[in-house]
């Protein structure tokens, strides 16, 4: 009889131990998921002077340029990963080094029109900014001399 009581007591303790270990494991998984994610304070933020430029009427085969100015309004450096025009008639030059907090920089966009008529071109800007990708636009009308 005593052996039966000891056996039942050991079985209860084993169940309690398994329950405790299960609780610890579940808690640790929840703790990992509850870790703070990337803080927005570690991301940059861009303020654009303008995102659209209208050239108006331009002459065919005479390249034009525009500068899109922006400012890093965050507390961490702003890094432009890439600046990609939507077609081969548009080129973009941009700073490759990080833009420090509070500083301004420019993206220069050139356009060489080969066809007559109205146009709208886009330039995708990817960076470490919280806003994600920005899209710049140039537009106008290509006319004869």
Image (cartoon, grey):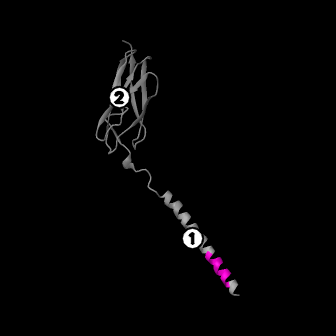
Residue 64's quadrant in the figure?
A: top left
Q: Residue at x 31, y 33 (%)?
A: 105
Queried whether the magenta region covers residue 8, the answer comes back as yes
Tag 2: Cα neighbours inside 10 Å, few (<14), some, or many (≥20)? some
> From the image, which quarter does the N terminus lie in?
bottom right
Q: Secondary structure at mark 2?
A: strand
Residue 133 in the image: state x and y as whole percent: 43, 38
Q: Residue at x 34, y 25 (%)?
A: 66
Residue 83 in the image: state x and y as whole percent: 42, 31
Numbered badge on residue 53: 2
Residue 135 in the image: state x and y as whole percent: 41, 34
Magenta stretch bounds:
5-13
Q: Residue at x 38, y 13 (%)?
A: 144
Q: Which residue is mark 1?
A: 20
Judged by its main secondary structure, the magenta piece is helix
Q: Secondary structure at mark 1?
A: helix
Nearer to us of marks 1 and 2 is: 1
């Amino acid at each position: 009889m005593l052996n039966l009581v000891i056996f039942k007591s050991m079985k209860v303790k084993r169940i309690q131990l398994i329950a405790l270990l299960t609780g610890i494991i579940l808690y640790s998984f929840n703790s990992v998921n509850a870790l703070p994610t990337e803080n927005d304070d570690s991301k940059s933020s861009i303020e654009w002077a303008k995102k659209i430029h209208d050239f108006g009427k331009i002459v065919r085969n005479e390249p034009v340029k525009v500068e899109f100015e922006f400012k890093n309004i965050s507390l961490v450096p702003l890094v432009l990963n890439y600046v990609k025009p939507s077609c081969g008639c548009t080129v973009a030059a941009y700073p490759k080094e990080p833009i420090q907090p509070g500083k301004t920089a420019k993206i220069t966009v050139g356009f060489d029109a080969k066809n007559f008529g109205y146009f709208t071109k886009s330039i995708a800007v990817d960076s470490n900014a919280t806003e994600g990708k920005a899209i710049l636009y140039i537009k106008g009308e290509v006319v004869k001399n």
